[in-house]
Image: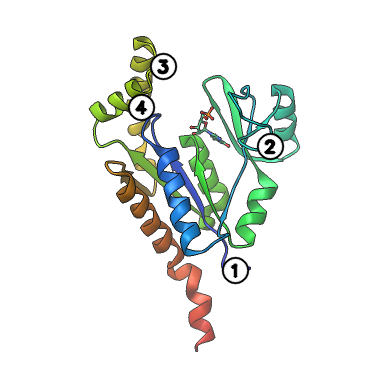
Amino acid sequence: MSDFRGLIVAVSGPSGVGKGTVLARVEELLEQANPGSVGHSISVTTRAPRGQEKDGVEYYFRTTEQFEQMIKDGKIVEYDKYVDNYYGTPSDPLTEMVGKGQDVLFDITIEGSLALNRKFDDDTVTIFILPPSMEVLENRLRGRGTETEEKIRKRMEQAKAEIRRAGEFEYIVTNDDLERAARDILAIITAEKLKASKNIHTAKELE
Ligand code: 5GP
């Protein structure tokens, strides 16, 4: 058990920018340095499971009625709609993980990141991930090979709208190279933990 509270690392960015891959690498590096230090928040969603996805592993899959009931009961700390489905973060597990010193990494919508930052202020850092260029982003979206021209055009429009909001975040990281982006995020996490406001009690003990 750590003396320090964990950090909520809320990461947003356009679809295709590589958030998932970068966060997986960040988690690997954090776990290497300090095993058991990363906690996992399992979101609740109203979308249907894909492929091998299982309830309680990738997501808690719920109906819209169940989701709305959870909101009413105060069990969801933030939620947003993404492509016609609800996605939300359960409150209790997050509070518990942060309380016992685990860092929790989120790949989450813009509204989700900003809501976590409002609710958990001192415990949260918000990071926006940019593609190195719009061409690279478009190529990555095309590389998936599953999308129609119309869908790619829509995703690029949405990406531009999202990138216009990057300034609402505390940090901006460009994913031109996976390893570098992951290390940039590690540096942000380290800096956040070294903030005087979080360490003043250590200084006081030395007085
Ligand atoms: P997918 O359907 O591909 O699993 O997720 C779509 C998007 O929903 C993700 O890229 C992520 O940004 C967002 N998302 C997943 N869980 C949450 C959540 O708990 N809250 C919010 N606000 N967004 C989420």
Residue receiving disc 4: 159
Q: Residue 13: x percent and y percent?
A: 39, 36
SS under mark 4: helix
Judge depth for marks 1 and 3 and give the one in front: 3
**Labelled disc at residue 63:** none
Tell me how far mark 1 sits from mark 3, CA to CA: 45 Å
Residue receiving disc 2: 56
Residue receiving disc 1: 2
The residue carrying mark 2 has its beta carbon less than 8 Å from ligand 1:
no
Tell me how far mark 3 sits from mark 4, CA to CA: 18 Å
SS under mark 3: loop
Mark 4 / mark 1, whichever is N-terminal: 1
Mark 3 / mark 4, whichever is N-terminal: 3
Mark 2 / mark 4, whichever is N-terminal: 2
Tag 3: amino acid? Thr
Q: Where is 11 relative to 183, above or below?
A: above
Judge depth for marks 2 and 1 and give the one in front: 2
The colour mode here is: rainbow
Question: Do the numbered discs 2 and 1 sit on residues whose CB atoms are within 8 Å?
Answer: no
SS under mark 2: loop
Judge depth for marks 4 and 1 and give the one in front: 1
Q: Nearer the viewer, residue 16 or 111?
A: 16
Tell me how far mark 4 sits from mark 1, CA to CA: 39 Å
Q: Label 3: how many residues lie within 10 Å, few (<14), some (14-19) or many (20+)?
A: few
Tag 4: amino acid? Ala
Q: Where is 186 relative to 17, above or below?
A: below
Residue receiving disc 3: 146
The residue carrying mark 3 has its beta carbon less than 8 Å from ligand 1:
no
